[in-house]
Image (cartoon, rainbow, N blue to C red):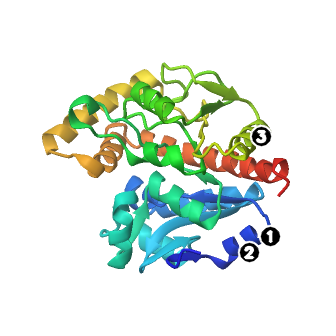
Amino acid sequence: MNPFLKIHPEVADALRNNKPVVALESTIIAHGMPYPQNVETARAVEHIVREQGAIPATIAILHGKLCVGLDEKQLEELGNSTDVWKVSIRDMAYVVSNKLAGATTVAATMRIASEAGIRIFVTGGIGGVHRSAETTMDISSDLTEMSKTSVAVVSAGVKSILDIGLTLEYLETLGVPVVTYGQPDFPAFYSRKSGFKSPLQLDTPNAIASMLHSKWSMNLEGSVLIANPISEADEVPFEVMEKHIRQGLEDAAKAGISGKQTTPFLLKRIAEITGGDSLISNIALVKNNAAVGAQVAKELLIVSGG
């Protein structure tokens, strides 16, 4: 057992007794949405996971511990503080050793979930290859982590502020399967379609769980990206959102924003440009992903004989 791991009693009990558990990241709480919508959304997502018959495990770094499962006080601490680190793999040791508050990205959440024995992780959208990466070399460590950590990621695709085509190519290079739930088109976070076809399509949680079980039973390490399209009622059409994203990118360049500050800046700026519509879509897609993730977690226990 990792000595820095602190598992909430409810989550620990579920893992001991082969109950389905769904990992949830905390960057969306500290850096993805304004207060109080961030904490309200975190609570709502956990509630949805429970409604579907699974146990939620929101992950963060607090007081020198890798926390798997947070209480109400900890959620408030993350959501209503201004000095919370955005933690990816490279930052984990520093944040833990200095006992700082850290909200975990996809990569860090996956690693901690794996340490705890959790196989299914729900997020909004993964990081990937940034636009203009051919000059900046800005590629999210989420992709590298997905190539080696055996935790499936349920998301609404790749964040649409990124280069989706290059991200799909890079995932193929890393050997990470990409399967879209219920449609042939790969989604683009706020939008159901990105202009790219999905490499794979599966139409039920059971089929997805069977694929995960087969992959890991063959000792094929690494993640599977389960792309879950946002509902038609909640999406922003791709062409409309692309205009807003381009404006946000221009504003980021003018402001000198780069590195890991880029995504939080763009999400906030796009919310401003859209008059809050993108934030509504963001909340809706995370809730949608939570329901599907919990269903897959339950089916995975069944197909694996857990």
Residue appearing at x 60%, y 51% in the figure? 151
Q: Amino acid at mark 1?
A: Asn
Horizontal and vertical percent position of residue 223:
58, 45
Single out the residue that lies furthest toward the front.
219
Report whether residue 222 is seen. yes
| Residue 81 visible from this viewpoint | no
Q: Label 2 vs label 3: CA separation?
A: 25 Å
Quadrant, the C terminus: bottom right
- Say what secondary structure mark 1 lies in: loop
Q: Which residue is mark 1?
A: 17
The residue that mark 3 highlights is 210
Is 190 or 132 nearer to us in this picture?
132
**Label 1 or label 3, whichever comes before in sequence order:** 1
Pointer 1 with pointer 2, Cβ within 8 A = yes
What is the C-alpha distance between the residues marked 1 and 3? 21 Å
Instruction: Give the amino acid at mark 2.
Output: Asp
Q: Nearer the viewer, residue 239 or 112?
A: 112
**How many C-alpha atoms fall within 10 Å of the one at disc 3: few (<14), some, or many (≥20)?**
some
Give 119 or 295, whichever is nearer the viewer.
119
Amino acid under disc 3: Ser
Marks 2 and 3: which is nearer the front? 3
- Mark closest to the chain's N terminus, 2 or 3: 2
Residue 88 image-quadrant placement: bottom left
Q: Which mark is residue 13?
A: 2
Seen from the viewer's position, the closer of residues 163 and 250 is 163
Q: Position of residue 286 (x, y in %)?
A: 56, 47
Pointer 2 and pointer 3: residues touching (CB < 8 Å)?
no
Where is residue 81 shown, x and y percent of the image?
35, 71
